[in-house]
Image (cartoon, rainbow, N blue to C red):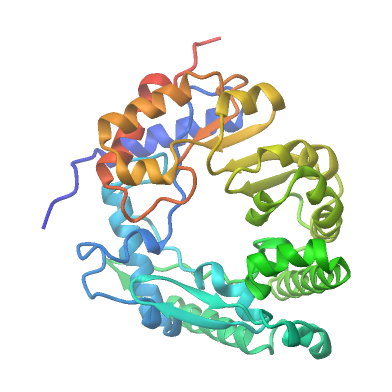
Amino acid sequence: MPQPPVVDFEAHNAEVREVWAAYHAARPLRVPFTLGLNVRYTMRRPEANPSGIGWREYFADAPTMARRQCEHQHWIRHWLNHDHEMGLPAQWSLSVDWQNCYEALYLGCQLEFRGTEVPDTQPLLADEDAKYQLFDRGLPDPFAAPAAARAWALWGALGELADAGWEFEGRPVARPWPMGLGTDGPLTVACNLRGASEFCTDLLADPDYAQQLLTYITSATIERIQAYRARLDQPVRSAGWGLADDSVALLSAEQYRAHILPHHHRLVEALREPGGPLHVHLCGDAVRHFPTFITELGAVSFDTGYPIDHAAVRAQLGPEIELLGGPSVPFLATHGPAEVEAECARILTSGVTAGGRFVLREGNNLPAECPPENVWAMARAVRRWGRYDPA
């Protein structure tokens, strides 16, 4: 079995703290480098998943979910050099994790396991004669709906592991984070429920139905998140909030304003304090929507995917908007370290760092096919081409 690179964890972690502290103080030393990672990245790596845990077991069983998450974190902390703490932690973090399936499951879709690939759900409303069925049922109960009840039971079981002092590699686990406090966005969830082609057709051919479904999804989302915040003794509205809705990449700017923006307004008004910052995650070719998110919703940060012209976006949005982005995930999966380092250098010297509000990352969510050597190439690039001149 290959051995992880030798890293001076103490020096690395000190550098990470310094880089992030300077960035958040608006006096950046260099561009920070982060990664979008979850257990998908290590699921098919025998050295990181020695028991061969599969998705079916992972979704169903709290001890299995805990072990897989700890194995994943252990591997990442020893193999991937980015601006995150490396080495053994004081505590391992746990969460109820059903990947991007939770909202569709919550609203009644069926889970489909696909071998070693990430599970997905089947559209519940794909048939024309069934597309109104959710409206007759009413909104799901945030705690009693079947998927919600299972998720909270997993949360309780993970918490019992923490309370019992369960350890991995000699370190305890923290109490878990629950599921369902965020959203993938009303349009994306509508595409999960109805099918992307079907729902995009609805927007044009049956707009009354499309709006009824979007309203239903938005109402269910607000009710769920507010109920979960109350259970966890969190404020009904948070000081800032993060919104995603990747499927807006399917729409023109005019269609987004007409069909989706009102529902995003409802979410933001219900879940974020007035005037608080909004952080937006949008994969795909969604740059045309960025100005609307800024002027209408108060967005201050965009986590981007691909394709994107980083320099053009910086020039369009100005120096104060935070941008996260970098080499596309297909590029990282199909090119070698030298090419990855060159691509990072191209991005970092394009003008996107103007204003000191850029964070390098993969665009977007590190693919399992990306070798660790490519991550190290990104780390080398950001240390060479991502430094700011002292004021």
Q: Residue at x 77, y 43 (%)?
A: 253
Horizontal arrangement in the rendering, residue 68 relative to residue 324 (left or right): left
Number of numbered markers: 0
Q: Quadrant of the N terminus?
A: bottom left
Q: Residue at x 44, y 46 (%)?
A: 35
Horizontal arrangement in the rendering, residue 371 relative to residue 99 (left or right): left
Where residue 100 sits, quadrant-wise, is bottom right
Image location of residue 160, percent across then percent down: 47, 82
Q: Residue at x 79, y 45 (%)?
A: 276
Q: Quadrant of the C terminus?
A: top right
Q: Which residue is situated farthest in the front direction here?
A: 205
Image location of residue 364, percent across then percent down: 49, 47
Q: Vertical placement of 218 versus 59: above or below?
A: above
Which residue is at the front of the view, 16 or 207? 207
Q: Vertical placement of 320 versus 277: above or below?
A: above
Q: Is residue 319 visible?
A: no
Where residue 263 sits, quadrant-wise, is bottom right
Image location of residue 328, percent across then percent down: 45, 41
Horizontal arrangement in the rendering, residue 168 relative to residue 123 (left or right): left
Q: Residue at x 65, y 49 (%)?
A: 249
Image location of residue 296, percent across then percent down: 85, 43
Which residue is at the front of the view, 150 or 7? 150
Q: Is residue 6 visible?
A: yes
Where residue 331 sits, quadrant-wise, is top left
